[in-house]
Amino acid sequence: MPSAVLFRRCFCCNGAPSLNPTRTKKQLVFMGSPQVSASVLDVLLNASREPNSIFQLAAIVTQPPSARDRGRKLMPSPVAQRALDKGFPSDLIFTPERAGEETFLADLKALKPEVCVTAAYGNILPNKFLEIPQHGTVNIHPSLLPLYRGAAPVQRALQDGVKETGVSLVYTVRALDAGPIISCERVEVDDHIKAPELLSMLFDRGSELLIRELPSIFDGSARLKAYAQDDSKATLAPKLKSEESWLSFSEEAFVLHNKVRAFAGWPGTRAKVQFVDGNGELDIQELKIITTRVRNCGDIHDNKDEITFKEDALIFPCAGCSALEVVEIQPPGKKVMNARDFWNGLRGRKLKKVL
């Protein structure tokens, strides 16, 4: 493994760090991987370092280093990098390929954690893992469970155009996001918020819930007050696929607008358009659609195939006498630009939709 990656995938039981036999603080293991998880780690690290803190971070578990950026260099997960930046011991950052690896489970058991906390960890936790922490494993899930169980709760909620969502603090069980709920908080959803911003907001709220509930989780009273989910009301939030990113203007504008918000970040949203010059020659290009609005049906060009420009947006006619206003766009090989700059760069060429 490259020298830049300072932590080990796991350490053997004989190499586990010595633990103070007179310790009074509860032992907590945090598990997370992406940037939103790093914000939860910040909250836990800060809280654990308070003079009156009842817990300390015994270890951090995250996804193994992956090849990222143009050079495809192996890089630690955002959680691992944040932990290193904060001075967390590198030999207490575990990066198993799977949470069921015997060596990893032995190392975790040696730490005797009372509670494990997960926040977008990205790995299935087997029963052998769930049996280790004395007071269970608690997950921060960015939805109002049992709604949107699965890998993409925020994205699927935005795609559905919900006006309200939230975050749930739940005990982890083997069934997908189906454990008893300790606490939850509702959040109103603005019509223009995108998935990355909403994810960040919900994990911030989830961190606050976690800190508030940790004393009851450690003493076991949270287990007594937690309530079962109503499985009959459960909905699923499957992982996003890159092939879902295409926009079809045969759908209504509000459907496309919600999809643009939901798929912001990854995989994004794409559309094909025709560039028509004065001689009628066509050039079809793929554009990334970044920011949109919905235009009411009273002000739409008569030609349903032609894309026009008004005020600060490209106007894409859609189904049901609706139109999608595209405010920001990214042409092939270029940076994100506003619609006005893109329109001015056409130099007289017309734009038409490709359904």
Image (cartoon, rainbow, N blue to C red):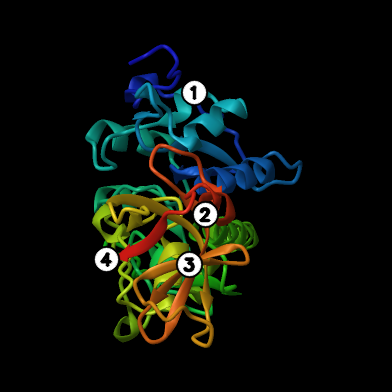
Q: Which residue is mark 3?
A: 308
Tell me the CA gap for discs 1 and 3. 56 Å
208 lies left or right of 269? right
**In terms of sequence position, does the residue under pointer 3 or pointer 2 come before the other?**
3
**In terms of sequence position, does the residue under pointer 3 or pointer 4 come before the other?**
4
**In terms of sequence position, does the residue under pointer 1 or pointer 3 come before the other?**
1
Question: Which three-letter amino acid code belongs to the residue tagged 2?
Answer: Trp
- Residues tagged 4 and 1 counted as in contact (Cβ below 8 A): no
Q: Which one is in front in this view, the residue at disc 1 or the one at disc 2?
A: 2
Residue 24, quarter of picture: top right
Crowding at dot 4, Cα within 10 Å, few <14 / some 14-19 / many 20+, comes out as few
Residue at x 68% of width, y 42% of height: 46
Question: Which three-letter amino acid code belongs to the residue tagged 3?
Answer: Thr
Q: Which residue is mark 2?
A: 343
Residue at x 45% of width, y 15% of height: 4
Tell me the CA gap for discs 4 and 1. 32 Å
Name the disc covering residue 90, or none.
Answer: 1
Tell me the CA gap for discs 3 and 4. 50 Å
